[in-house]
Image (spheres, rainbow, N blue to C red):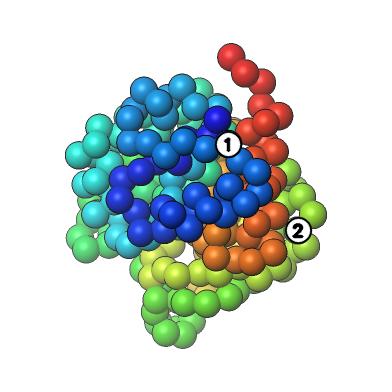
Amino acid sequence: MIAVIDYGAGNLRSAVRALQHVGAALTVSDDPKVIAAADGVVLPGVGATRDTMQELERRGLTSVIPEVIERRTPFLGICVGMQVLAETSEEWGAHACLGVVPGSVRRLPEAGGKVPQIGWNQVHFATEHPLFASIPDGADFYFVHSFYVDTAAPEIVAGRTAYGVEFPSVLAFGSAVATQFHPEKSGRWGLQLLRNFVGLVEAHPKP
């Protein structure tokens, strides 16, 4: 069973529908006990890191997310669900995030084009990972964001994208993965990526 964390994210329903489309058995919950007991966890997200952190804190979820990641439960963060894994964010003033990933969330430079970046862009793989099975290097995915994770740990960067700056568009560490793009809005390759994540959950040894 995969727990999709419900903290009021705007893309919750579309993420749930896409996961169901690729065969995932889901529960949607904001209960820390349900999330902690799940075989896999998905943290969707749109909007600002500050608002997301406030909602996670209000629901008592700021400790359970690092705990499931440390326990190596398969985890997928999407868009803001990736950004809040960082230590800090500069969005709407400096503030703390979950501190799972070393680094900070920074604004995209205007040199790349209009900010926010809205639309399709290529993801170039930095490493081989089961999340990318049957997906070609350089495949297009759908982005909607003004900020990115500037991480001090290049070894966890599994995919990169260029938009004024080359930024991490996929992170992978332990049994956790995270994408800056929205796989639920990314057509064929997005569904394949979600299918691959479901496969990682199904293949993961149960405690």
Residue lying furthest top: 207
At label 2, counting other C-alpha atoms closer than 10 Å, the crowd grade (few under 14, some 14-19, many 20 or more) is some
Foreground of the two, 120 or 96: 120
Q: Name the residue beneath numbered marker 1.
A: 25
- For residue 81, above or below residue 38: below
Q: Are marks 2 and 1 in contact (CB under 8 Å)?
A: no
Foreground of the two, 185 or 118: 185
* Residue at the (70%, 38%) spot, across then down: 199
Q: Is residue 34 left or right of residue 41?
A: left
Task: Say which of marks 2 and 1 sits in front.
Answer: 1
**Disc 2 to disc 1, C-alpha distance:** 23 Å
Q: Is residue 50 left or right of residue 22?
A: left
Instruction: Say if residue 103 shows up in the picture.
Output: no
* Residue at the (58%, 36%) spot, across then down: 25
* SS state under label 2: loop
* SS state under label 1: loop
* Residue at the (30%, 55%) spot, across then down: 49
Task: Give how far across and how far down residue 7 sits, in percent.
Answer: 31, 45
Of mark 2 and mark 1, the one earlier in the sequence is 1
At label 1, counting other C-alpha atoms closer than 10 Å, the crowd grade (few under 14, some 14-19, many 20 or more) is few
Task: Give how far across and how far down residue 110 sits, in percent.
Answer: 40, 82
Which quadrant would the N terminus be assigned to in this image? top right
Task: Give how far across and how far down residue 155 sits, in percent.
Answer: 60, 45
Q: Name the residue beneath numbered marker 2.
A: 135
Which quadrant would the C terminus be assigned to in this image? top right
Q: Where, by quadrant of the figure, is residue 134 drawn? A: bottom right
Foreground of the two, 35 or 172: 35
- For residue 19, above or below residue 57: below
Amino acid type, callout 1: Ala
Instruction: Say if residue 203 shows up in the picture.
Output: yes
Amino acid type, callout 2: Ile
